[in-house]
Amino acid sequence: MGWNDDVIEKFRSSKGTENYWGPKLVILHSIGAKSGATHLNPVVGFRNEHGWRVVASKGGTPENPAWYHNLRANPSFDIEALVDGEIVTVPVTATEIPADEWREAYDAIVAEEAQFGGYLEKTDRRIPVLQLTPRAA
């Protein structure tokens, strides 16, 4: 079993209590831009009044993660998230935070999880932040 598989299994079996990110973990069910296949990607989800925000940090590497390209190509997909103590599947639509709102969004994320600030120091790219807004199933 790979790292992602292990993180996902622990999240599901513990209802979000036993994994690296705890209840902040969300599992993206991204749809491959080229393949059309569903991919499961565990990421940190930051709850806000509109749903969740996720950061395409890839640890501050020079390139965006593959799931970012998938969400840009196929912005309607499902996530698994902890809501009111239960893991639920939520249909969402992803939109990228525009440049004029990016700094405020990223600063709020760093205030909640300081490690994301370090990712900016490792790369020259503006690390994308995406809003995942729930939609009707």
Image (spheres, rainbow, N blue to C red):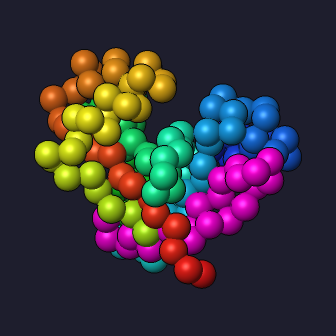
Please identify the quadrant where the C terminus is shown. bottom right
Residue 28 found in image quarter: bottom right
In the displayed structure, 115 sits above or below 2; it is above
The residue lying toward the viewer, choosing from 107 and 68, is: 107
Residue at the outermost front position? 49
Q: Residue 107: x, y in percent?
A: 31, 28
Q: Is residue 58 magenta?
A: no
The residue lying toward the viewer, choosing from 129 and 111, is: 111
The residue lying toward the viewer, choosing from 126 and 86, is: 86
What predominant SS class does the magenta segment belong to? strand
Could you tell me if residue 60 is visible in this image? no
Does residue 30 appear left or right of residue 23 in this picture? left
Q: Residue 43: x, y in percent?
A: 53, 43
Could you tell me if residue 106 is visible in this image? yes
Q: Residue 15: x, y in percent?
A: 81, 45
Does residue 132 appear left or right of residue 125 in this picture? right
Please identify the quadrant where the N terminus is shown. top right
Please report the residue visible at 14 percent of the width from the left and 45 percent of the height from the top. 100
Residue at the outermost right position? 13
The residue lying toward the viewer, choosing from 125 and 4, is: 125
Magenta residues span 72-92
Please report the residue visible at 31 percent of the width from the left and 34 percent of the height from the top. 106
Please report the residue visible at 44 percent of the width from the left and 73 percent of the height from the top. 76
Q: Residue 8: x, y in percent?
A: 70, 47
In the displayed structure, 18 sits above or below 11; it is above
In the displayed structure, 121 sits above or below 127; it is above
Q: Is residue 73 magenta?
A: yes
Does residue 117 appear left or right of residue 46 in this picture? left
